[in-house]
Image (spheres, helix red, strand yellow):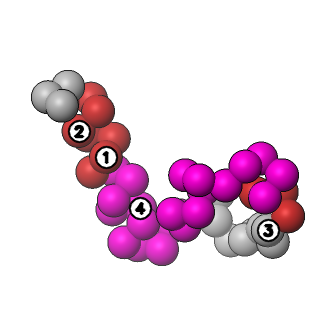
Amino acid sequence: MTDPDYIEWLKTFRIAYEQGLINVDFLVDSSAQVQEKPTMPNIL
């Protein structure tokens, strides 16, 4: 995988995860599972 845009997005997701901005569950949860989880009002 040498697409620079793809690599940049991977880095962006890694940084966001490390900062606690996203949970890895969003990558594998179904739409219904995402809707069941509580929302975090302080994160846009």
Give the class, few, some or many, for how many residues have Cα within 10 Å of label 1's Cα (few <14, many ≥20).
Answer: few
SS for tag 3?
loop
Residue 31 lies in the magenta stretch? yes
From the image, tell me which residue sits under label 3.
37
Which mark sits nearer the N-terminus, 1 or 3? 1
Which residue does the image show at 58% across and 63% down from the upper left? 25
Which mark sits nearer the N-terminus, 4 or 1? 1
Which mark sits nearer the N-terminus, 2 or 4? 2
Q: CA distance from mark 1 to mark 3?
A: 24 Å
From the image, tell me which residue sits under label 4.
16
Q: Which residues are magenta?
A: 12-33
Identify residue type, mark 1: Leu
Q: CA distance from mark 4 to mark 1?
A: 10 Å
Identify residue type, mark 4: Ala
Asked if residue 7 is positioned above or below residue 3 in the image, the reply reads below
Which mark sits nearer the N-terminus, 3 or 4? 4
Q: Position of residue 10 (x, y in %)?
A: 31, 46
